[in-house]
Image: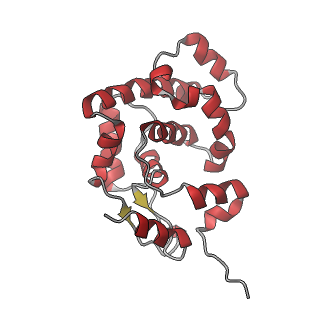
Amino acid sequence: MKKTIKKCGWALSSPLEERYHDLEWGVPVHDDRLLFEFLILEGAQAGLSWVTILKKREEYRNAFDNFNAGIIARYDDNKINSLLANPGIVRNKLKVNSAVINARAFLEVQESFGSFDKYIWLFVDHRPLHNAWKTAADIPVSSRLSELMSKDLKKRGFKFVGSTICYAFMQATGMVNDHTTDCFRHKEIENAYTA
């Protein structure tokens, strides 16, 4: 009899979500470009489902110069208007404008800290936090640390970085391991990324 591999319930909603769950979600990210990508995508997701953003992820990469903050920081009104006409992304003016604002703030953080990675991982003392949630219902939508991160990012000029968005960002980039304890990825990530 074939043994069934247990996974977080949300991962079973679609093949796209399952692939993302199995390969990316909760894996520590230290690449500045990818951290910026997640920051923008989590902000774009506000009020929408994550699968909506996953479906648009490739078009986001195309439309936003592969999340190159140096290029995005120089976007002008013409570029912003072309983005707002692109059906492949979330065409919300505040969210599109926030990507440009966040790119500029991101570059300033890189300048101040040497990398965005060095800055953002300070919130968890440069070590992933391994939670032990038994069910999806136990997983919070924010935390004390996501509150602190949100306040600090806002102080530095970032937009669409509320506490809930910051917590989702922390989950996505492996700052917290929020796979449920019965999910095969919980132990894999804990074993691979425990300092």
| Residue 175: x %, y % from top left | 39, 54
The coloring applied to the image is secondary structure
For residue 84, side relative to residue 177 (left or right): right
Q: Residue furthest bottom?
A: 1
Figure check: 24 above or below 100: below
Looking at the rendered image, the quarter that the C terminus falls into is: bottom left
At which x and y percent is residue 118? 30, 42
Question: x, y percentage for residue 116?
Answer: 35, 37
Q: Nearer the viewer, residue 125 or 30?
A: 30
Where is residue 106? Give x, y as percent: 38, 30
What is the number of callouts on the image? 0
**Residue at left offset 40%, top offset 68%:** 131
Of residues 101 and 93, the one drawn nearer to the viewer in this rendering: 101
In this picture, is 3 found above or below 52?
below
The structure residue drawn at horizontal position 52% and vertical position 73%, both measured from the top left corner, is 135
What residue sits 43% from the left and 42% below the top?
31
Residue 150 falls in image quadrant? top left
Q: Quadrant of the N terminus?
A: bottom right
